[in-house]
Amino acid sequence: MGNRKEKKQKNRMGAWIGTALVLLGVLILLSVNITEIKVTGNRKYTPEQIEDLLFEGRWGRNSLYCYFREHFKPHKQIPFVEEYEIVFRDARRVEVIVYEKRVVGYVSYMSSNMYFDKDGIIVESSSSRLDGIPEVTGLDFGSIRLNQPLPVGNQEIFEQIMNLTQALSVNEIRADQLRYDDHGDAVLIIGDIVVVLGNNKDMIGKVTELHDILPKLEGMAGTLYLDRYDETKGNVWYSFIQESGG
């Protein structure tokens, strides 16, 4: 009888000790905060902006809370970010890997900027303006909806927009505006430089040449004519008319 009672007391004591150890472990973990954050994959946001978005509030940098939030709660929705993951290197060091939406252009629609990707799919609606992403103007669009293709009635013009905006993105040319006229000819606005590209013929070659020419025009203002570019010719023809006083 006595042995059974002693055994119960020992079991109870063991349970109390186990509970106390668990609580102590939790208290220790609750006192550990993330002190080093590395952000990778980001282009549209600075590392500081990502930190402010993901680690805000009283418990924002607590290691235990962040681990629970990362693995058991839905991720925060961030404009222009497809997804992100927080990788714990140890209790105090994490890496945030950002997977951004690859937008190549946007159109203005009902007081919003509707951004589209390389396939022409509208992926984001925002009131903000991304530097280096061109606004497409001069064309009539139908009703624009998220996750749907850019509603350009003329399929040929649609493909031209996709080819040109993707070529600009690949060549890392940061344009402000891509303007089309009634004939479907394209004009780029890059700061104080107007680039006349003309029709869609040899457009990839025109953009490649533009990439090489732009550094020579840094600090200038004027109009660059690439509309007569012909990749079948050995010499590249272009002209630049500088603004007076530029």
Image (cartoon, rainbow, N blue to C red):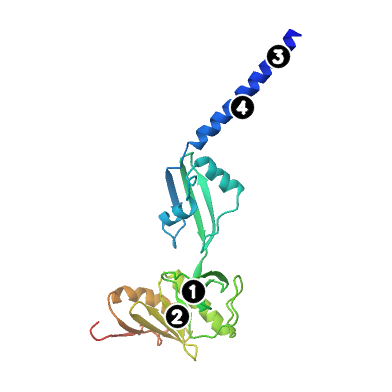
Could you say which disc has been placed on residue 61 in the image?
none
Distance from disc 2 to disc 3, alpha carbons, whole Å, reads: 82 Å
Residue, far top: 2
Residue at x-position 60% and y-position 74%: 145
- Front label number (1 vs 4): 4
Hey, which quadrant is residue 12 in on the image?
top right
Residue depicted at x 58% and y 85%: 154
Q: Of label 2 and label 3, which has the lower sequence position? A: 3
Q: Is mark 1 on a helix, strand or loop?
A: strand
* Helix, strand or loop under label 2: strand
Answer above or below: position of 182 versus 16.
below
Q: Is residue 6 left or right of residue 143?
A: right
Mark 3 → mark 1, Cα distance in angstroms: 74 Å
Mark 3 = which residue? 7
Q: Residue furthest left?
A: 245
- Amino acid at pointer 1: Gly
Quarter of the figure that contains the C terminus: bottom left
Q: Which residue is at 27% across, 75% downward?
A: 219
Marks 2/1 in contact by CB < 8 Å: the verdict is yes
Q: Is mark 3 on a helix, strand or loop?
A: helix
Residue under pointer 1: 105
Q: How far apart are marks 1 and 4 (CA)?
A: 57 Å
Which is more N-terminal, label 1 or label 2?
A: 1
